Image: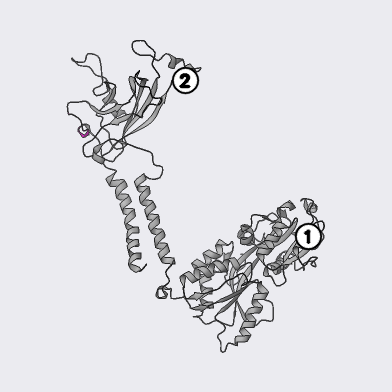
Amino acid sequence: MNGSWQLAFAVLGLALPGIAALWEFVLVGRKRLGYRVQMDTTARDERALPYAGVLQQMQRTNGGPLRDPSFVLLRIENSGWAPIVENSYLAPDRGHAGIQVKCRGRRVVGMVVTELSRNELRGFFTPSGDDQHPTPYVPGLGVTDGVIELPKVKLNRGDHYKVLAVLEREESFTDEEFPEPEVVASIVGGVRRGKIKKTEYYPFASKPVRWVLALLVMVSAVQSILTFTRHDATAAPLDCATGTLTLSGSTAFAPVLQEAAKQYHRTCPDAFIPITNDTFHGSVSGLDALAAAGRKAKPTGSQGLGDRLAFSDGPKSDGRPQLLPRPVALSLFALVVNKDAGVQDLSLKQIRNIYAGKITNWSQVKGNNVPIHLVSRNPGSGTRTTLERQVLDNKPLLAVTANDCTALDENKPGRCEVSDTETLLSTVASTPGALGHSEVGAATAHDDVEQIRIDGYPATLEGADEGAYPYWQTEYAYTYGEPPANSLAAGFLRYLANEVGKDIIRSHGDRPCAELAKPLLCRPS
């Protein structure tokens, strides 16, 4: 699709709301007479029930009982915005009736006006008499040859009245169900040749307008597709860089980087950021790989590598002076437990005693009688390092008892290690009594593990801000030296700090450093 197609869809997107408003408030909203059948029910079975004495006494004027009696409640209304007057009705000027109601298969035995939207309408239904009609009657209101006739009532915008009719089955009509009443009327200059229209209540919008809105959504979707699937390099933003960028480091932050890399490539088609299952091996591993790549390339001058980034949960250790940090996000971590442990909340003291080997069974903390199996990340993991520093008061983990987590003895406590977050979560879910640690976004996506509250506080940014939740860390992006401003590494870092990048970071449960009060520190307030 070229630019002319996009312009056409943009014009259509602007025109559709105007068309919808014109239809709803001008075309179909002018002079219009409507009706609703608010009740159409029989009383054939109810007459024999208790408390139905009045129904049992219903009879014709000659004293005979009604045959299969039924009730019809009609609402006649001005459903447009123009007033309806007597000469609006398409009926003979000398005739008093403006609306006819036919109830096929039934005979009308009684009729009454039950509701008027305002008192001024009462005059149209007040009986009167003259020389030709000594008995008081209402002109235009009555029954002629079994057809209900209603007078030419003047109706302002929103006016209505209701008519209740009592009917009985005609002897010649044998169908089980009665057809819906047929309302016949026309007005001069009305919508759709002026015929009376059965109106409905629309809680949102009328059916035609709903179709227009659906079409508008489709147009917007096509515009979005055209925007995000363009592959001409000339339309790329000015900040786009070209080439291939290699990422490494934190497995906990990997889901954020994977999504950001895809979105960046869509925005900048000539930028390639390959990500596979072997891309991320942990924070320390990523820093080591970046340092080794820098030494091999031996960048000269003040500029460093522009095609590599490493991400770490927390700051680097000493010994890598060429690696420069840039805080990217405040990341939350969580302790996760197998659901058969029977616990959802632990105090900080209980957690430290568990990892120190002083508590070895979940029953010791009011859980189920299941041995505790600690599933941890390999050394060099930022998630593990953060656990030791922030939660365990810089205490190291217990010695590994099984090199393979599947070899843990289910009858006694033990500890094993895995290489990445996804494997840890799957292992905790499948190992009875297992306790592990993970980035919050990944843990939330696993319904088969339970996240542990610490001292009653869940893993939330608010809890970290208040100092109540301790398991958090700053996520850093590291470069080897200062990358060139026009390099892919520098462009990707700017992308993570702009609005799209911040939205991606937030969607995974982390907080972008760029929106904190002190972004360079990137710590809870």
Q: Nearer the viewer, mark 1 or mark 2?
A: 2
366 lies left or right of 137:
right
Q: Residue at x 35, y 51 (%)?
A: 212
Tell me the quarter of the image containing the C terminus.
Answer: bottom right
Q: Where is residue 142 in the image (x, y as percent from the top left)?
A: 27, 21
Q: In this view, does 10 lie above or below 127?
A: below
Tell me the quarter of the image containing the N terminus.
Answer: bottom left
**Image quadrant in which you'd find residue 416:** bottom right
Determine crowd level at label 1: few under 14, some 14-19, many 20+ residues with C-alpha closer than 10 A. Answer: many
Q: Which residue is drawn at 67% across and 63% down?
A: 438
On whether residue 468 falls in the magenta region, the answer is: no
402 lies left or right of 288:
right
**Image quadrant in which you'd find residue 442:** bottom right
The answer to whether residue 322 of the structure is visible from this angle is no
**Image quadrant in which you'd find residue 423:** bottom right
Q: In this view, does 479 lie above or below 204?
A: below
- Secondary structure beneath disc 1? helix
Determine crowd level at label 2: few under 14, some 14-19, many 20+ residues with C-alpha closer than 10 A. Answer: few
315 lies left or right of 193:
right
Pointer 2: what residue?
46
Q: Residue at x 29, y 44 (%)?
A: 28
Q: In this view, does 64 lie above or below 139?
A: above
Q: Where is residue 421 in the image (x, y as percent from the top left)?
A: 66, 65
Pointer 1: what residue?
354
On whether residue 91 falls in the magenta region, the answer is: yes
- Secondary structure beneath disc 2? helix
Q: What residue type is labelled 1?
A: Ile
Q: Where is residue 444 in the image (x, y as percent from the top left)?
A: 62, 58
Q: Which amino acid does label 2 sit on?
A: Glu
Image: magenta residue range:
87-94
